[in-house]
Structures are given as C-alpha cells and as structure tokens.
Amino acid sequence: MTVENKNSFISLNIGVITVSDTRNKTNDKSGDVLSQAINDAKHCLIDRRIIPDEIKEIQGIIKEWVSTNNFDAIITTGGTGLTGRDVTPDAIMPLLDKEISGFSALFHQISSSKIGTSTIQSRAFGGIYNNVFIFCLPGSPNACKDAWNEILVHQFDINHKPCNLVEIMPRLSEK
C-alpha cells in the first residue's frame, strides 16, 4: 500500500488583463470567465484590468505588475489573433526570459478538438518574465475556459502530479 504525500493547497496571486479596443466592465466576458475560475479555484485575483491593443500599454502594465513582486502569474485574454490590432504576442514575447512552448502546443491540441483548423488563427502562448508566469489566451470565453479548465487549473495546483508550475514558482519556493 502506497501513501500519497499530499501538499497543502497554495493560493496563487494572479492578475488578469483583457486586451481589447472594444471591451469594458459590462461586456468583458472572457475577463469574467477567468476571474470567476481563479476565485472558484481558491486563488487570489490580485488585479484585473482592461487595456487597449497597444504594445506600450500592454508592456507597461506587465512591467508594473511584475515589478511589485506580488504576482505569481498573469493571464491575458485578447489580442492573440492575426488582425492588425492583435498585438499581445508582439508586446509580451520580447519581455520573456523563457517561453513555455508546451503551453501553446497543448492549447492548440485542445482547441483543435473543438474548433478544428480554426485554431491556427490563435497565437496563444505562455512564458516567464522575471519569475512571473504569463499566459496569453484568445479573447473568446470558450478559449479561456479551455485553457483554464484543461491546463492552468492543473498546473496551478501543487498536488497535480507528476509535476506542476507551483513547485517551481520562485516567490513560493522562497518561503
């Protein structure tokens, strides 16, 4: 008989950024989905913002939040498509110390099973900037649900085996 070593739950500090020229507090469904999922998972939603598709604004809020040392993860929604105003990857990728290429691969695999080849129109990705995990999701509420329910909720759980991101988050391992 094996005894499972279960760690105590660790609540992460997470920020949500909606990148959109058209969303506001009343119609930000993707931001609502992510905020509710974070709260339901018993993590702490530290801040939530809606900002326009502007590289300087996206980089500014990411740099501001990361500099506080209060965030374990930041999730963005929107701006990952292929149109001219979709600049989230263009803003965040240059900031990254490391890309989490497996996130994008797994997200597209999950997405493909639901929307087929249309998944190629998303530039969803993940990475690490100054020890903060950043995940950039499409602006679709369903895409946010897929990314959270099928990937992030597990990787943000210290008890997910064989491994999870919580185990390697510097702010938490310093305790």
Image (cartoon, rainbow, N blue to C red):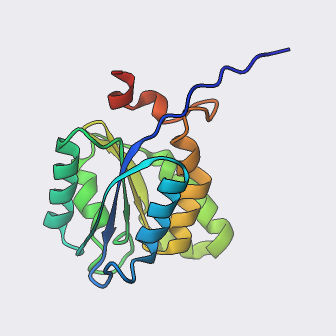
Residue lying furthest right in this view? 1
As displayed, is residue 26 above or below residue 89?
below
Name the residue at 45% across, 76% down.
Answer: 29
Q: Is residue 107 in view?
A: no
Name the residue at 30% across, 77% down.
Answer: 20
Q: Quadrant of residue 59?
A: bottom left
Q: Quadrant of residue 115?
A: bottom right
Q: Quadrant of residue 139?
A: bottom left
As displayed, is residue 24 above or below residue 113?
below
Q: Residue 3: horizontal and vertical position, in percent?
A: 76, 17
Q: Residue 67: horizontal and vertical position, in percent?
A: 17, 43
Name the residue at 57% across, 31% down.
Answer: 163
As displayed, is residue 130 above or below residue 113?
above
| 114 on left or right of 59 | right
Q: In the depicted view, which residue is nearer to us: 56 or 51?
A: 51
Of the 4 image quadrants, the one containing the N terminus is: top right
Q: Is residue 62 in view?
A: yes
What count of labels does the image hold?
Answer: 0
Q: Residue 89: horizontal and vertical position, in percent?
A: 31, 62
Q: In the depicted view, which residue is nearer to us: 144 or 31?
A: 31
| 25 on left or right of 6 | left
Q: Residue 110: horizontal and vertical position, in percent?
A: 62, 61
Of the 4 image quadrants, the one containing the C terminus is: top left
As displayed, is residue 132 above or below residue 83?
above
